[in-house]
Image (cartoon, coloured by chain):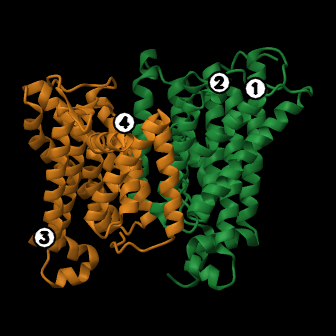
Chain colours: A green, B orange
């Protein structure tokens, strides 16, 4: 297969965009529907990546491929999911400030453990040895196949999230997010619903983290910074946090702009890419959050269709 | 016994700015119900302004405090007028307000990198003497910083709890409409609070900056702990924040001595505080929600 048209930057850019879309879709369930503002997205993502890597690299596996890889992937997702269950239990009945402190604190804790537990994670030097579970020839071909797998996983997440919107479970989530005491008084288990959704979303984030770790081949504590949370959040808010397609459109417009258009197609001096562009990107993302939420809080796509319909019916 | 005195001395001298910063954040939280994430950049800006005035004009550290406090206070007021006030007028909810402050924090943090550059910067101050306090060596500089923080914290406490303007602030925080019919001008008092809070944060930042170095992440690295102190100390009474801030500093120092690593101490503190909040459960802190 001739892959000359595809350069390494473009493939990395596409990988970033699709991965952040996955994170933003999961954040849409947590923040857009149930209104739990998860500021610790990177904590679950990083925990999944490290849990996968520690099991995959650190254990002397007695069985052959691909089982160690698959088991480690599942382990990464499960550990992140269990962390989601624990963090969710701690914060689900707190107010937004409590959610902020709990999720930020969790992400910081994961970072601290990644730095301090040198025996497991390699500390600040990082942890290598993460490789693809297949070898179909050149590096580029392997990376393209891995990108295809990520695409399929994010496709499944998208399918799951769209199904939720049309199901009774989705209406339960929306009602809990909208007015928790009301949902509770109608006999809906609000706390359990939030907890379960938060754990499932976190497990998905952990799986995406593990997939990212394989593509990067190396995990370092710097890679689990607040910018991952920011990318998912700004994409979702810009596109419209109440809509499924909001995550996709918003992430393409933000992460896609910087990781693909600026990275591969703008004729800028090379030195800018290491210093000025990353700083500028974070500034633009932060500024976008502020401007969108003040001027158009529901983002480009606007409020949920259901709510628009309800308003029309009531003649508002 | 040695362990106790060491924790006490190190905790109070090294973490004194935490108390000051937490008081500022608590003021804004109490008035608006907003945890302002961008407050961490007010702290960072304070450190940068102090360093800049010190290295450019040759002011001594204590002479930089006045311009630092004023600039950081004005900066804080500017963020209120340019961002939080319009957002409130457009009816943004508490969740949206927190995300706005998060976005503003990221924007400002990286904006400061453009202005002051990424490498860490230092104050140009003479090397301080080391004196023994209960057998623990402490730089005179940190002791003076502690003394200044105590004085500033007490002044702030007196201002909010005892002065006439402080009474207006507290009235506005507890019931905006009632305060308005009593003749209190909400905009003036609100701007005043943002100014005082910003000045407190900026001064805390300059104490941190002169104690080690000035970097774009200075405020953000402290923010989680400031935030935890405010959440646990409660917004009802500034005194609670002072006590919890001091206890937090001592606990961090004690755990650092025990585990030999400051990161473990921070981890222990995060876990302890979040579990405490869970056990305390949902509570309305008596703040005027945005």
Provide the residue designation for mark 4.
Answer: B217
Q: Are marks 2 and 1 in contact (CB under 8 Å)?
A: yes
At which x and y percent is residue A143?
74, 24
Q: For numbered disc 1, what is the local secondary structure? A: helix
Figure check: B160 above or below B255: below
Q: Quadrant of the C terminus of chain B?
A: bottom left
Marker disc for residue A57: 1
Q: Nearer the viewer, residue A252 or B10?
A: B10
Q: CA distance from mark 4 to mark 2?
A: 25 Å
Provide the residue designation for mark 3.
Answer: B162
Spot the residue most to the front: B1
Provide the residue designation for mark 2.
Answer: A127
Query: Residue at point 64% right, 26% down?
Result: A119
Q: Nearer the viewer, residue B182 or A87?
A: A87
Q: CA distance from mark 3 to mark 4?
A: 35 Å
Q: Is residue B98 visible?
A: yes
Quarter-of-image position of residue B153 = bottom left
Dot 1 and dot 3 within a common chain: no
Query: Residue at point 84% right, 23% down?
Result: A134
Q: For numbered disc 4, what is the local secondary structure? A: loop
At which x and y percent is residue A223?
55, 31
Figure check: A3 above or below B175: above
Q: Is residue A104 visible?
A: no
Q: Are marks 1 and 3 in contact (CB under 8 Å)?
A: no
């Amino acid at each position: 297969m001739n892959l000359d048209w595809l350069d390494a930057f473009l493939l990395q850019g596409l990988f970033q965009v699709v991965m952040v879309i996955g994170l933003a879709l999961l954040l849409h369930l947590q923040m857009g529907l149930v209104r739990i503002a998860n500021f610790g997205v990177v904590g679950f993502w990083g925990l999944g990546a490290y849990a996968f890597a520690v099991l995959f690299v650190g254990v002397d596996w007695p069985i052959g491929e691909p089982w160690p890889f698959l088991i480690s992937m599942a382990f990464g997702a499960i550990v992140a999911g269990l962390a989601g269950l624990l963090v969710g239990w701690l914060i689900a009945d707190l107010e937004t400030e409590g959610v902020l402190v709990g999720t930020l604190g969790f992400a910081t804790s994961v970072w601290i453990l990644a730095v301090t537990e040198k025996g497991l994670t390699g500390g600040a030097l990082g942890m290598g040895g993460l490789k693809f579970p297949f070898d179909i020839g050149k590096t580029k071909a392997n990376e393209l196949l891995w990108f295809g797998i990520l695409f399929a996983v994010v496709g499944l997440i998208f399918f799951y999230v769209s199904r939720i919107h049309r199901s009774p479970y989705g209406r339960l989530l929306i009602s809990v997010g909208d007015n928790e005491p009301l949902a509770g008084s109608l006999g809906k288990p609000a706390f359990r619903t939030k907890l379960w959704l938060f754990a499932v979303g976190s497990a998905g984030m952990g799986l995406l983290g593990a997939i990212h770790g394989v593509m990067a081949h190396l995990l370092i504590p710097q890679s689990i910074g607040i910018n991952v949370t920011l990318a998912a959040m700004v994409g979702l808010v810009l596109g419209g946090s109440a809509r499924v397609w909001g995550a996709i459109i918003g992430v393409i417009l933000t992460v896609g702009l910087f990781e693909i258009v600026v990275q591969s197609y703008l004729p800028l001096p090379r030195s800018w890419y290491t210093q000025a562009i990353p700083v500028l990107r974070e500034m633009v993302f932060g500024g976008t959050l502020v401007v969108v939420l003040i001027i158009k809080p529901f983002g480009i796509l606007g409020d949920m269709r259901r709510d628009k319909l309800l308003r029309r019916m009531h003649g508002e | 016994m040695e362990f106790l005195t060491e924790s006490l001395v190190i905790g109070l001298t090294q973490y004194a700015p935490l108390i000051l910063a937490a008081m500022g954040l608590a003021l804004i939280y109490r008035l608006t119900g907003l945890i302002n994430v961008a407050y961490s950049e007010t702290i960072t800006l304070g450190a940068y302004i102090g360093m800049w005035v010190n290295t450019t004009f040759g002011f001594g550290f204590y002479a930089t405090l006045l311009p630092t406090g004023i600039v950081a206070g004005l900066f804080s007021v500017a963020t209120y007028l340019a961002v939080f006030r319009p957002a409130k007028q457009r009816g943004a909810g508490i969740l949206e307000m927190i995300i706005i402050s998060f976005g503003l924090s990221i924007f400002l943090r990286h904006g400061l990198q453009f202005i002051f550059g990424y490498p860490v910067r230092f104050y140009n101050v003479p090397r301080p003497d080391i004196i023994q306090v209960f057998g623990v060596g402490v730089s005179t500089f940190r002791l003076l910083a502690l003394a200044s923080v105590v004085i500033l914290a007490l002044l702030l406490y007196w201002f909010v709890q005892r002065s006439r303007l402080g009474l207006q602030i507290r009235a506005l925080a507890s019931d905006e409409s009632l305060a308005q019919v009593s003749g209190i001008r909400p905009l003036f008092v609100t701007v005043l609070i943002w100014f005082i809070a910003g000045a407190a944060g900026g001064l805390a930042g300059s104490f941190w900056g002169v104690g080690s170095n000035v970097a774009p992440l200075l405020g953000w690295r402290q923010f989680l702990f400031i935030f935890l102190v405010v959440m646990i100390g409660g917004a009802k009474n500034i005194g609670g924040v002072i006590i919890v801030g001091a206890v937090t500093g001592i606990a961090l120092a004690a755990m650092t001595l025990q585990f030999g690593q400051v990161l473990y101490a921070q981890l222990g503190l995060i876990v302890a505080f979040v579990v405490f909040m869970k056990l305390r459960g949902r509570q309305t802190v008596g703040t005027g929600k945005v």
